[in-house]
Amino acid sequence: MDSSEEKLHTLLTKIRDFLRAEVYPLEAEFLRRPFRELLPTLNSKRAEVKALGLWSPHLPEEYGGPGLKLREFAHISEELGRTPLGHYLFNAQAPDIGNMEVLISHATPEQKELYLWPLIQGEVRSCFSMTEPEHPGSNPVWMTTSAIKDGGDYVINGHKWFTSSAEGATFAIVMAVTDPEASSPYKRASQIIVPTETPGFHIIRNINVMGEEGSDYASHAEVRYENCRVPQGNLLGREGEGFTIAQERLGPGRIHHCMRWIGICERSFELMCEYAARRELSPGVLLGSRQSIQEWIAESRAEISAARLLVLHTAEKIDLEGAVAAREDISLIKFFVAGILQKVLDRAIQVHGARGLTDATPLSYWYRHERAARIYDGPDEVHKTVVARSALKKYGVKVSL
Ligand SMILES: Cc1cc2nc3c(=O)[nH]c(=O)nc-3n(C[C@H](O)[C@H](O)[C@H](O)COP(=O)(O)OP(=O)(O)OC[C@H]3O[C@@H](n4cnc5c(N)ncnc54)[C@H](O)[C@@H]3O)c2cc1C
């Protein structure tokens, strides 16, 4: 084992031990109670993670993290993904993780001081506000929210939804059109930091998703921006770069989701096998003795292992060549791993029978929450088009998104 492998191994072991001893036992309460009621407990666990030196494992060393390559972080993220609380307790949760990455790459020193460092310390939360109910999120260059210059400010007006974690967030990174006349649609929008206490930032409601209204970090808000005035100094990067920055953000964001989904798959697989090995169909006859169950176990094992290899391959490519070069690989794993996730979760629930629908395990929680995996950060169909477009290009066929 070389020194970087050893460093990763040590970190993984510490994280695994902490999750099993301190976090899995919290799941039963988490599954039954609203997020806000658990905040005091979760905050004290976050403090423990910090004290153990395990905080923000995705960050480079200069920002207080372990400085792992993406390929290495994939293993950590998988481990965190095995419990619905993992990423949050280690400060590596979406959308904050994506906002941290964007701020590291594009924020000015003043913006870093005001927004990035408090996020890194876990003192605040943030949200990312791009999708609008009136326009297809799968075509991110089509939006109405505008930011018009007035004096030294931007005045923002618009309507967003699915701004995840907006409740309780200190700031939003908002995508708004700053130059509607730009000849390229990719140059019309910019990203602007909006403190949520700014007059005109209104959370209309937390949207009911799969029967749950959610709260705080675990919520998805509809937001209106009504003459929301922020200094021009809140612009992220340059004007007109909003789409480029969003692409930069969403590439790594998608692979972060895939890494987490492998963790969910592994835990579901374990739960499926454990139950098949103890549930008796009649005295002495185990569920696991049935061929249909064995088939689900074998197929799940093969699919999860294949998905992990694809994710690691893509992470390595991003490490070596950057997210733009890995665009098709990212699209490929986004729909492929999301599909495996749905299949494995469904089989694990089926093996548990009615118990699979209860809160006795995290399976039903994941089943509700992760149906969205095939939609957020680009629906399956768009990612499949990206992959097919590249394959067909070699044959002279032009495919538009
Ligand atoms: C749980 C969750 C959290 C989210 N969090 C955030 C967030 O924090 N911030 C934010 O800004 N947004 C967020 N979103 C929004 C998300 O990014 C969008 O839902 C997504 O981009 C799809 O956009 P849409 O819902 O408008 O669907 P549409 O774009 O209207 O598409 C509808 C359907 O049409 C099909 N389709 C679309 N395009 C094509 C195509 N080219 N070819 C073939 N079929 C196609 C797909 O099946 C798709 O599901 C979140 C969404 C969910 C579900």
Image: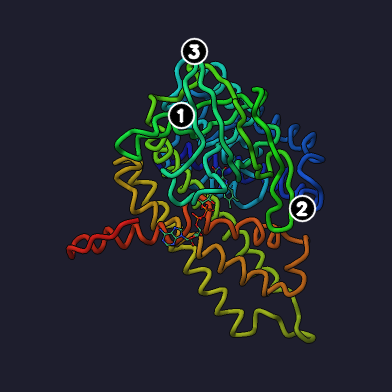
- Disc 1 marks a residue whose amino acid type is Pro
Q: Nearer the viewer, residue 17 or 339?
A: 339
Residue 175: x and y, percent? 49, 34
What residue is shown with label 1? 60
Of pointers 2 and 1, the one earlier in the residue sequence: 2
Label 1: few (<14), some (14–19) or many (≥20) C-alpha neighbours in 10 Å: some
Amino acid carrying label 2: it is Leu
- 219 w.r.t. 382: above or below: above
Please name the residue that numbered disc 2 is placed on.
Answer: 31
Identify the element where label 1 is drawn. Answer: loop
Does residue 118 appear anywhere in the picture?
Answer: yes
115 lies left or right of 143: right
| Left or right: 124 as drawn, with respect to 117 | right
Query: In the displayed structure, would residue 15 be above or below residue 273?
Result: above
The three-letter amino acid code for the residue at tag 3 is: Gly
Residue at mark 2 to residue at mark 1: CA–CA distance: 33 Å
Name the image quarter holding residue 141. top left
* Mark in front: 3 vs 2: 3
Classed neighbour count for the residue bearing mark 2: other residues with Cα under 10 Å, few (<14), some (14–19), many (≥20):
some
* Relative height, residue 38 to residue 299 (above, below): above
Q: Report the front residue among 213 and 249.
A: 213
| Mark 3 lies on residue | 151
Measure how far apart labels 3 and 2 are at the Cα level.
Answer: 49 Å
- Asked whether 93 or 62 is in front, the reply is 93
The answer to whether the beta carbon of the residue marked 2 is less than 8 Å from any atom of ligand 1 is: no
Could you classify mark 3 by the number of other residues whose Cα lies within 10 Å: few (under 14), some (14-19), or many (20 or more)?
few
